[in-house]
Amino acid sequence: MSNQRASARWVVVVIFFFFMLLHQTDKLMIGSLQVQISEDFNITNTQWGLVNSGALIVATVLYPIWGYLYDHYARAKLLSLASFVWGATTWLNAIVKSFGGFLVTRASTGIDDSSYPGLYTLIADYFGPHARGKVYGILQLAQSIGYLLGMVLALMVAPAIGGWRSVFYITGSLGLVIALLIFLFVKEMPRGKAEPEFENMAEMQTFKFSWAEAREIFRKKTMWFVFLQGFAGVFPWNVITYFFFAYLEKERGYDPDGILLTMTPVILILAGGYFLGGLLGDAAFKRSNKGRIVVSSVGVLMGAIFMYFAMATPVEAKNQFFVLMCLAALFMPLSSANVIATVYDVTVPEVRATAQAVEYFVENAGAAFAPILTGLIADMYDLKTAILLICTVAWGLCFFFYLGAIFTIDKDSHDLRAQMAERAKAA
């Protein structure tokens, strides 16, 4: 690979990193703003859950549409459009003055939340199978750092500059800037370009979307286990994102400074866990097709165990709670980059965005209702019960689904490599 091409692909990684960083900041900081916004509109936990479920439902419905568009048209330009939509809808969310208006405009922010399959598939055409996990891990660092940045904006910046609406104006404006950067500097790449079978080819054949290949997604047994773990696995993330800060403040007695001092190290460790998961997954994948699945299964199991013990820690034992949360944060994200890479380890290039979109659709089809479910349980009992129950049950199910995938991944991965080899030979 030429130095020029290598530099160009890392420029794309940098731009996408900042896209994800700022987009996740905008998306996730609402969890840290729960108390401020709830007091502003005088709403309950159940109504708060409805606010967040609205955006998730919109994203869920649009995943198949985004996936279809990404497999048919230029992904770079569509990502630029998604970033523009992010900026515009966040501005609208800041402008409205009634709870009804806030509910509707917050739901509209889900339009761009379903745009990630195009980003990941474009990266898959810049980097080969043995490097994708690391690159996805680098990109997903942005999710946790964005969570941390959102926390800082919510707890420190918002009170100083006029409240939560002001920070929405900031993040919405940044979305418009990122849209321009993607439009100008991110170039499209032929689908399948980074597959090892085509590595030394001067001319790439064009792979176009095929309904026959799209149907093959559902004939791969590994994908069914991916779908099942996705359905269960996103529940905890939505619960933690939208309710954990209120739990720390209301039930563990932390003030804003205490939340910041406790959660900053936890989130930084969480960020490192994304990259560590991708790194370990790539290393394990080089030894065995099962490698990414093994890393993922260890991550969800240990994450569930440490989360349980952290939540069961007495309120006065703050140091013990902190240590256990740090350990949970290290293991929780190990599976994330590996799930994305596994989807691309078993699907052909021209339907990867569709495959990823279907996986996200299945995830959000259930998890979109996680905030509502959490709010209902919290209003019936307390936030601790809601968070603990949903997280431990969901991650326990994920562990068993990963065990199933261990028995199917070899065949599905081998079938893809054989299909790519046949295409390369026919070219």
Image: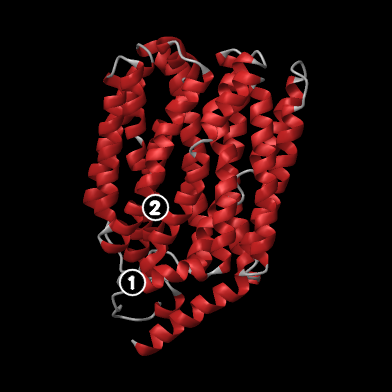
- Most extreme residue toward the bottom is 426
Asked if the residue under mark 1 is in contact with the one under mark 2, i.e. CB atoms within 8 Å, the reply is no
Q: Examine the rendering and report whether any part of residue 135 can be seen.
A: yes
First in sequence, mark 2 or 1: give its number.
2
Q: Which residue is mark 1?
A: 210
Looking at the picture, tell me which residue is in the foreground, 319 or 387.
Answer: 387
Q: CA distance from mark 2 to mark 1?
A: 28 Å
Q: Quadrant of residue 27?
A: top left
Please tell me how crowded label 2 is: few (under 14), some (14-19), or many (20+) other residues with Cα within 10 Å.
many
Residue drawn at 45 percent across, 20 percent down: 154
Counting other residues with Cα less than 10 Å from the Cα at mark 1, is it few (<14), some (14-19), or many (20 or more)?
few
Residue at screen point 36% across, 28% down: 106
Which residue appears at 36% of the width and 89% of the height? 426
In the rendered image, residue 164, in percent from the top left (x then y), is placed at: 38, 17
Label at residue 287: none
In the rendering, at what x and y percent does residue 252 appear? 67, 16
* Amino acid type of the residue tagged 1 in the rendering: Ser
Seen in the picture, residue 157 relative to 373 is either above or below; the reply is: above
State the image quarter where residue 424 is shown. bottom left
State the residue in front, 154 or 186.
154
Amino acid, disc 2: Val
Please give the residue where the numbered disc 2 appears in the rendered image.
Answer: 13
Mark 1 residue element: loop
Q: Is residue 407 left or right of residue 168?
A: right
- Residue 151 visible to an observer of this rendering: no
Which sits in the foreground, 356 or 147? 356
Q: Position of residue 336 (x, y in %)?
A: 55, 50
Circle 2: element type? helix
Image quadrant for the N terminus?
A: bottom left
